[in-house]
């Protein structure tokens, strides 16, 4: 009779949870379900943010504000930035892929705190809906995603307060997620699995989560003070009442420079998983990759004032932050060359996942170069708050992170659904996105260098042609979403079956069925000591051997 | 059948080690809590950094009042430090399985926390400046208020733990006392923050 109890225990958790499609709308505690919830929810917000971007580019197709009123433009701009950062990139590169992959990578059946995990996800939809409906009910915030005072204090209060509340909720979600990732990676590893054997994405998520835990609370506290300024008429950041706006900027950027790494470090991790598989070579320079990530985390916390060179920063501060920022280029460069070395001489399959990853490498190096340029004070004081900065950070967040998100969808879709995506549509998507992206944001460098300020609905007519080119690029990007959407929906229903491991990959998430069972593996979790042991002919690749080390030595 | 059996005994052994595993479980729950407290500490760090910067670069306009007296905050510091010690005693008692003594120490700790809150209120009502009077005043109320919120939550937590530590039917036992340990860590943290706050706001 004791025989009867254990299976019951085994299935206790799954049985409390709904199954079938309904579980994706439930308070599920399964990390795979939560990961896909993050992904689909994030993508829905991406469509909203994209529509807002379309509105912005339509307005900017002509030098006068004819498509929207100026204050509407400000609201649309603020919503666009906030949605894209807090509801699309951050939740997707961290929450979606982190939740889906990290438990596999550490050999666990779930995250360390499954319920906290579900709470973290379910904070996001209400926060996002609140933010977006504020546009229709009261008018949205108008002070940009940075909410700089005094602008955020003088523009209509209701929209700004709703903005603050929603960012606080999203920040809370992010902190809960970060705590969960740190605990899972450090405490939940399967026995025998050493830190230096973890797939690179684990390291990226560990570094990112450290940044989340250290910097997000500072933003939260700052926004609470800002809301006091708006609601209770205190004067923390209100110069009219003796306050200090520059302190807001310091506190804001203490979060928001790390935030750019919160958006891009996980993407670094994801490409580091994708490249070796499709180039059939081990990830080059594993150890230097790990140290580079940790160096970026450390340096990322002490470079924030490079966003403030025009805010009356004293010379010593400019010097310090310029040098610190320049130092970040070193670990970043190491990672870049490691990726190149990984695909160098590999047997590359140029499928959609690989094409998007290569697009990422190209775009990211351009964004990185303009970043180093921006860190130089004499240059920055000329282009600060111009379209040059807009171009720079879109090369990083879109050309970098968004490209990697798409690469990851193409790479892991067979794992999520058990079916393959259509390759041709994927390549079409990639080509349209790459051309559209560069057409949209490349010319903005020129606009900025020639003095077009950012965040304006109207501009000098001499910039009309280049703005129109940029808007055409945006249109192309909008169109590029259609083959993607068709592809993911169509393939889920009738795509060819993928089998368990269509890429012959060695990382642990592929050493189980696709889609995986609720407990991730039937039986014990595999011990993967060499997750990148590629480089042997396919027929010698023994996927049944849970450890990649043997495979690696065959290759040698 | 054999496979079911072996699976069953597998499960049983993992269940048996489940007690063991519970400690492991409790272990990383404490780890998670500690991580959260680091995040929480960063919020305070932001407030303190703002306050110190304001002090350094934003002199108050003539006639603005920002004066703090020391006696009450010193009393507050003593109250909190003693409460940390009494909470520690409660933890020791539960480990020895002495529920009665544990709960007495818990009540004393909660009482000290509530005394702190009362004394803080008295200070608020006797101070010669209000929330919106000037920059330093606002920052003072924001930082101490945020800390007071933590003490309030902590006192509630102690009372909940007191209830859970009842000898019959409570979930806290000599072997499994995660809620108590968690509340204790949190309480020490809140006290530690107070000491830093005291130095920065009252002494500097
Ligand atoms: C390669 C290393 C990087 C360097 C050296 C760098 C440097 C800079 C500098 C100096 C600025 C300030 C420009 C100005 O406002 O005048 C800036 C702005 C910005 N960067 Fe980067 N950056 C780097 C990477 C990134 C990454 C990885 C992201 C995001 C994933 C990013 C996103 C942004 C954003 C959003 C802004 C604009 C902020 C605003 O609204 O003012 N950057 N960057
Ligand atoms: Cu930055």
Image (cartoon, rainbow, N blue to C red):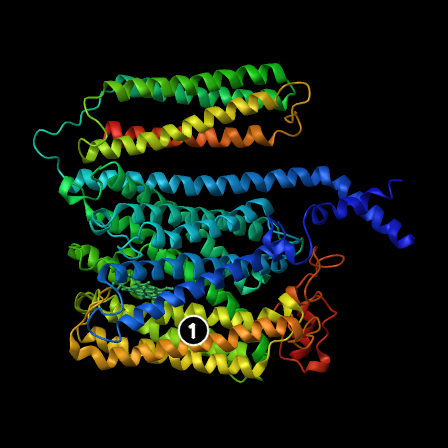
In the image: residue B97, left or right of residue A73: right
> Does the Cβ of the disc 1 residue fall within 8 Å of ligand 1?
no
A319 vs A453, nearest the viewer = A453
**Residue A244, horizontal then vertical, whole percent:** 18, 45
**Residue A21, horizontal then vertical, whole percent:** 65, 58
In the image: residue A507, left or right of residue A12: left
Relative to A373, residue B20 above or below: above
Q: How many marks?
A: 1
B178 vs A128, nearest the viewer = A128
Q: Subunit of mark 1?
A: A
Can you see residue A150? yes
Sort mark 1 into few (<14), some (14-19) or many (20+) by Cα contacts within 10 Å: some
A89 vs A383, nearest the viewer = A89
- Locate residue A374: give its quadrant: bottom left
Tell which quarter ligand 1 is in. bottom left
In the image: residue A425, left or right of residue A536: left
**Residue shown at the point (29%, 42%) measured from the top left:** A227
Q: Name the outermost residue toward the left.
A: B62
**Residue A433, horizontal then vertical, whole percent:** 43, 78
**Residue A4, horizontal then vertical, whole percent:** 86, 43
- Locate residue A315: give its quadrant: bottom left
Pointer 1 residue: A336
Relative to B36, residue A484 above or below: below
Q: Quadrant of the C terminus of chain B?
A: top left
B180 vs A553, nearest the viewer = B180
In the image: residue B68, left or right of residue B28: left
Can you see residue A264? no
């Amino acid at each position: 009779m004791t025989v009867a109890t254990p299976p019951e225990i085994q299935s206790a958790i799954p049985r409390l949870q709904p199954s079938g499609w309904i579980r994706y709308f439930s308070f599920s505690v399964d990390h795979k379900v939560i990961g896909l919830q993050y992904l689909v929810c994030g993508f829905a917000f991406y469509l909203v943010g994209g529509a807002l971007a379309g509105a912005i580019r339509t307005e900017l197709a002509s030098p006068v504000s004819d498509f929207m009123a100026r204050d509407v433009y400000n609201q649309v701009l603020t919503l666009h930035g906030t949605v894209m950062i807090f509801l699309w990139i951050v939740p997707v590169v961290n929450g979606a892929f982190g939740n889906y992959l990290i438990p596999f990578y550490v050999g666990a059946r779930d995250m360390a705190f499954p319920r906290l995990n579900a709470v973290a996800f379910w904070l996001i939809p209400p926060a996002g809906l609140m933010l977006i409906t504020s546009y229709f009910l009261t008018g949205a915030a108008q002070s940009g995603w940075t909410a700089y005072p005094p602008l955020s204090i003088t523009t209509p209060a209701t929209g700004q307060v709703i903005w603050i509340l929603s960012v606080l909720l999203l920040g809370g979600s992010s902190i809960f997620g970060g705590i969960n990732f740190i605990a899972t990676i450090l405490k939940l590893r399967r026995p025998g699995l050493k830190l230096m054997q973890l797939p690179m994405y684990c390291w990226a998520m560990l570094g990112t989560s450290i940044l989340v835990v250290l910097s997000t609370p500072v933003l939260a506290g700052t926004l609470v003070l800002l809301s006091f300024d708006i609601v209770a008429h205190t004067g923390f950041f209100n110069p009219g009442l003796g306050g200090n706006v520059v302190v807001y900027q310091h506190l804001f950027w203490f979060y928001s420079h790390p935030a750019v790494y919160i958006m891009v470090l996980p993407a670094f991790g994801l490409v580091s998983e994708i490249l070796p598989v499709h180039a059939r070579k081990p990830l080059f320079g594993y150890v230097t990759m790990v140290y580079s990530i940790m160096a970026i985390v450390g340096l990322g916390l002490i470079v924030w004032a490079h966003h403030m060179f025009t805010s009356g920063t004293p010379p010593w501060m400019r010097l310090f932050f310029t040098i610190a920022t320049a130092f970040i280029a070193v670990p970043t460069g190491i990672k870049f060359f490691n990726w190149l070395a990984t695909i160098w001489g590999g047997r590359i399959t140029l499928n959609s996942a690989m094409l998007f990853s290569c697009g990422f490498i190209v775009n990211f190096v351009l964004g990185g170069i303009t970043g180093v340029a921006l860190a130089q004070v004499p240059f920055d004081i000329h282009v600060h708050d111009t379209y040059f900065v807009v171009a720079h950070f879109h090369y990083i967040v879109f050309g970098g992170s968004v490209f990697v998100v798409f690469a990851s969808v193409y790479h892991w879709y067979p794992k999520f659904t058990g079916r393959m995506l259509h390759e041709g549509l994927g390549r079409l998507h990639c080509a349209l996105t790459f051309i559209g992206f560069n057409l949209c944001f490349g010319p903005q460098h020129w606009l900025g260098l020639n003095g077009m300020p950012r965040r304006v609905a109207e501009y000098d007519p001499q910039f009309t042609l280049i703005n129109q080119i940029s808007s055409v690029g945006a249109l192309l990007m909008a169109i590029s979403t259609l083959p993607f959407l068709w592809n993911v929906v169509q393939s889920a229903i009738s795509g060819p079956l993928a089998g368990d491991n269509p890429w012959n990959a060695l990382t642990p998430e592929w050493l189980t069925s696709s889609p995986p069972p609720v407990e991730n593996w039937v039986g014990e979790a595999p011990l993967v000591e060499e997750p990148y042991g590629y480089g042997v002919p396919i027929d010698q690749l023994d996927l049944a051997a849970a450890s990649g080390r043997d495979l690696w030595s065959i290759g040698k | 059948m054999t496979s079911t059996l072996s699976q069953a005994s597998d499960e049983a052994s993992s269940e048996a080690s489940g007690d063991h595993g519970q400690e492991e479980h409790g272990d990383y729950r404490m780890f998670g809590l500690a991580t959260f407290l680091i995040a929480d500490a960063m919020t305070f760090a932001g407030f303190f950094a703002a306050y110190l910067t304001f002090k350094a670069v934003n002199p108050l306009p003539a006639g603005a009042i920002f004066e703090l007296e020391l006696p009450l905050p010193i009393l507050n510091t003593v109250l909190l430090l003693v409460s940390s010690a009494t909470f520690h005693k409660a933890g020791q008692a539960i480990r020895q399985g002495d529920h009665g003594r544990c709960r007495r120490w818990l009540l004393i700790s909660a009482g000290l926390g509530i005394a702190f809150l009362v004394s803080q209120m008295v200070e608020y009502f006797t101070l010669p400046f209000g929330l919106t009077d000037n920059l330093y005043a606002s920052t003072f109320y924001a930082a101490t208020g945020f800390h007071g919120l933590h003490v309030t939550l902590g006192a509630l937590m102690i009372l909940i733990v007191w209830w859970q530590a009842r000898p019959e039917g409570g979930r806290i036992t000599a072997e499994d006392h995660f809620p108590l340990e968690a509340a204790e860590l949190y309480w020490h943290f809140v006290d530690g923050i107070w000491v830093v706050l005291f130095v920065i706001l009252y002494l500097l």
